[in-house]
Amino acid sequence: MYAVLDIETTGGKFNEEGITEIAIYKFDGHDVVDQFISLVNPEREIQPFVVNLTGINNAMLRTAPKFYEVAKRIVEMTEDCIIVAHNSEFDYRILRTEFSRLGFEFKRKTICTVELAKQIMPEQESYSLGKLTRALGIPVTDRHRASGDAIATVKLFKLLLAKDLKKQIIQDAVKAEPKYEMATNLQNIIADLPATTGVYYLHDTYGKIIYIGKSKNIRNRVNQHFTNPRSRKIQNQVAAVTFETTGNELIALLKENAEIKHNKPTLNRATRRNLFTYALYSFIDENGYINLKLDAADGRKKAITTFSNRKTGRQFLFKAVENYKLCPKLVGLDASKTSCFKYPINECEGACLQKESPEHYNLKIQQLITENNFEHQSLIIIDKGRALNEHSVILIENGVFKGFGYYDLNFQITNRKILESIITPMDSNRETLHIIHSYLRKNQQVKIVRLME
């Protein structure tokens, strides 16, 4: 659990500042579950430049509670939590100073989103909260007020969690929070898991990830791990389960694939089976017609698209024959010496007998290739997000998969620079392209937007 906070102060000499406003959002890594926002009477004058910056003046604070009156609530809100702040060194120092004046030692583990952003997004020009949120398309209201800056930090932290493919933030959090550790009752873990689509992480008692999986129903899938007699190794080693909801299965598949490679969990199979074993290739015959051939996948040859097995490849070809009015013989579904089986019933225009011109037939094949291959294409794939007002976006540039992100405002994807900033970078390879192609074949309602170069 995290306590994301922001503090406004009077300004002044080091360690003589007083708190004028505090906002704390208790964040479970997915949603805000509690909040505390209050002006605070610092019992000292506010520096004029601070009044101009925040809009908070001495008159506003005369009737506000003094720090000792809100101290108990701050302790409750941050107990068993990691404090997260933008420049946490400052906020944490101010809190410790105020508690020290009350004779109370305040100690919490902290995370600084400035340092985190520098590690995860080294390409950014500035790491000030205002410029960073603007570059990422994160809307900020009430800038330089505790509540506005704290909720902006929540949104930034959520984005950083998504971009952290090595899951270092989560692993450190599990290690720091003993309440995550489970003794014998695995059922307690299951009760806190959502019945939604996403990726889940099984941790040992040191916080290290020992298994990564994806599911359309995280709770049910983890329950299967905990009740299956063949999963004794997992049951004996797991101490905590964390998760990330993804909103749709495509993002879950891509995250699972990438994060297993990054983290190499000991209980994931050392050599995972190939995601695809068959591929679709094209060649031009002696009569000038583009033929299609379903064959065993060969990394040395350029494929149009790939398939998990031969059966799904043949199913694709049968649909392609119907959708694009192709000749079964020229796509490898008919081995007859004469016309194909569709020509006598007028469902083939005669390419098998050279009655349909190569130019006309090849246009249909080219359409199939364009719609099922990203080569030299730039586009975004838009799907469901993690909340009602959110969408996911996958970016492909010139046929190369760049990564995924989430947005809730259209300008975040129409502005190319912001779009590239909110994307979590991922490797583009045959596996990732296979995952995307397979998903799009099964989910044709997904929106695809071509990008202008």
Image (cartoon, grey):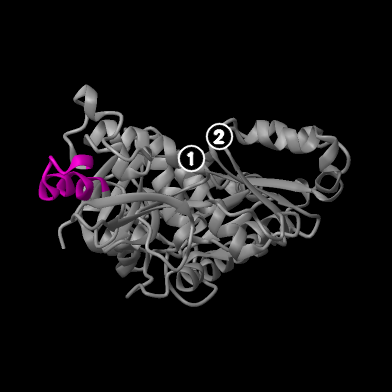
Tags 2 and 1 touching, CB below 8 Å: yes
- On the image, the x and y values in percent for residue 337 come to 32, 40
- On the image, the x and y values in percent for residue 174 come to 70, 54
Which residue occupies 34% across, 65% down? Answer: 132
Please tell me whether mark 2 sits on a helix, a strand or a loop.
loop
- The residue pinned by badge 1 equals 249
Q: Quadrant of residue 143?
A: bottom left
Instruction: Look at the image and say whether residue 48 sits in the magenta stretch.
Output: no
Residue 151 shows in the view: no
Q: Going by the image, does 409 lie left or right of 208?
A: left
The C terminus lies in quadrant: bottom left
Considering depth in this image, is 437 or 68 the residue closer to the camera? Answer: 437
Q: Residues within 10 Å of mark 2 (few under 14, many from 20)?
A: some
Q: Which residues are magenta?
A: 352-368
Residue 216 shows in the view: yes
Q: How many marks?
A: 2
- On the image, the x and y values in percent for residue 297 come to 49, 57
Which residue occupies 38% across, 32% down? Answer: 388
Please tell me whether mark 1 sits on a helix, a strand or a loop.
helix
Considering depth in this image, is 288 or 258 the residue closer to the camera? Answer: 288
Residue type at the position of mark 2: Lys
- On the image, the x and y values in percent for residue 22 come to 48, 52
- The residue pinned by badge 2 equals 216
Residue type at the position of mark 1: Glu
Magenta stretch prevailing secondary structure: helix
Q: In 3D space, how far apart are the residues under numbered discs 2 and 1 (Cα atoms)?
A: 7 Å
